[in-house]
Each structure stands twice: as C-alpha cells, then as structure tokens.
Image (cartoon, helix red, strand yellow):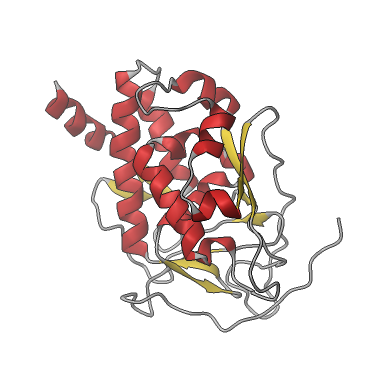
Amino acid sequence: MPMAATTTIKPLLPLSLSPNKSCSYSIPSSSSFISCNPISDSTATFSLLHSNRPRGQISVSVAFNPQGNFDISMFEDEGNSSKLEPPMPPTEGRFDVILDNDAIRNLDLSPFHSATGITSPTLAEPKEFLERTIGFTINYTREDPRDPRELSEFPDIRLWFVRLDAAYPWLPVLLDWRAGELARYAAMLVPHQMSMKMGIVFNPEALELFIMNKVFVVYTWFKQHNVQKPRLKTSDMARMLGFGIEDRLFDLVDRESS
C-alpha cells in the first residue's frame, strides 16, 4: 500500500490544558499508531495510577484505524522524524460491528447486538469475547465530502459511542486492542483536539479519569464472572493507553468488596 502524503496543521491544545502538559496520540491514515507523551516532567493525578515509562515520557504504540489520510510521526522535530511500523491487522474472527449513518443518528445499538449477540449487560460472558475480541467498521457518509474532520470529531458518532459505553461500561477490555479499537474508543469518549503534528491531543486529566473509571468497572466485572488473573488483564488494558496500575489499588477494591 503506498504511503499517504503528510498533511500539516498547527497543533492545538485542549481547553483547560496548560501549554506544558498534554497527551498526544499520533494518527496515520488507514493504520495509525498511538503515543501518549506528557510534554512536561509531570506525574499522574492518582498516586496509584502511574506511567509505565520513565518520567516525562509515556509512550505506547498500537494500530489505529480512523477515517482519514495521514502519515504522522509523534512530536515531529526537524530532522528527527521516526518511521512508523506496519500496523497490526484486525484479529481474525473477531466480532465486527458495522455502523452506518442511520444507526448512528438514531442511537440504534442493534448493530452491536446482532454482531456480538450481547443484548443485555447481565448476559455477556467475558471469556469468548476476550478470545475473539470486538471491532467496529464505521461506514459514515459525510454531508460534505470535503469535511476534513476525523470520525471522533463528529458529535453524532461520539454520542452513539457514549450510549454504547453507558450500556456496556466494561466493553473496552473486550475490544481488538492490537488493531487500535481501544485507542479509537477512547477518542470517542475523552475530550481532545486534533493536531497534525501531534495527532489527537487528549486532555490528560480526562484521560486519567477515563482509565480509572474503566479499571474499577472492568476489574469488578471480571471478578463477578470469575475470570482468571483479573488484575493482570485489567492492568493490560490501562497499559495499552500508557498507564500502569499498582496492586495497592486492587487491594483497596478487594477490601471494600469483601
């Protein structure tokens, strides 16, 4: 596949974000890579949530498949651009949820129900979905074909994912991580702005809150279903977005629920 041409936009910072602190996610086109790098030497808000990289450098790469045509390197310095590795393909045999404009605008979750067989949060069993994983194919027709926005910038698409997440809050752990579905899912729910130099620029506090919320939800859900190694699997999910979870956090949750 030919390399997409590089497009450049002036980087933007999200509202309420100081100029020396941000999280940036790079987005190449039909296959992207995600990196989260605090620009300053800052630490995470939560003492039990920490970056799994040296201070000042939180970086994680996964394939990501947004709509667009970009080839961007993280923090592109002049003469110091890194070449992106080939993307990981979608997991073979995964549950593929196909969305179109009608489903999105009507907040219709039936494409998810029919693709996965999950029709109620109480009926889903983690094991099969952890093995096969879940992904999304978004066939969204723009009203203006020249609209340059990414899928995560369309309010109606984001609202559909907000509704899905409200119904199935543990869903991120079942997604096809290696094909970038966790990265795209986070982009649908976490405030961010687009930068062609730094990709998706997340509000770091919002990203931390998103991760902590999912850690609590997923860990509790795993324990309810007697999933083996729930701490490890929950921590792996957080690590995909560049954060590590200390065992002390799980100890506190276990103590409260016992």
> Is 72 left, or right, of 112 in this rendering?
right
Q: Residue at x 68, y 70 (%)?
A: 81
Count numbered badges in the picture.
0
> Is 127 left, or right, of 27 in this rendering?
left
Among all residues in the image, which is located at the extreme right? 2
Counting from the top left corner in percent of width and height, residue 243 is at: 40, 48
Counting from the top left corner in percent of width and height, residue 44 is at: 30, 57
Viewer-side residue, 62 vs 166: 166
User: Residue 223 is drawn in which quadrant?
Assistant: top left
> Is residue 22 at least partly visible in the picture?
yes
Counting from the top left corner in percent of width and height, residue 18 is at: 33, 78
Quadrant location of the C terminus in the rendered image = top left
> Is residue 169 at least partly visible in the picture?
no
Q: Residue at x 38, y 80 (%)?
A: 19
Examine the rendered structure and indicate whether residue 202 appears above or below residue 241: below
> Is 242 left, or right, of 48 in this rendering?
right
Q: Residue at x 52, y 66 (%)?
A: 153
Counting from the top left corner in percent of width and height, residue 79 is at: 70, 78
Quadrant location of the N terminus in the rendered image = bottom right
Viewer-side residue, 249 vs 141: 141
Examine the rendered structure and indicate whether residue 67 appears above or below residue 124: below
Examine the rendered structure and indicate whether residue 124 appears above or below residue 186: above
Examine the rendered structure and indicate whether residue 246 appears above or below residue 30: above
Viewer-side residue, 55 vs 37: 37
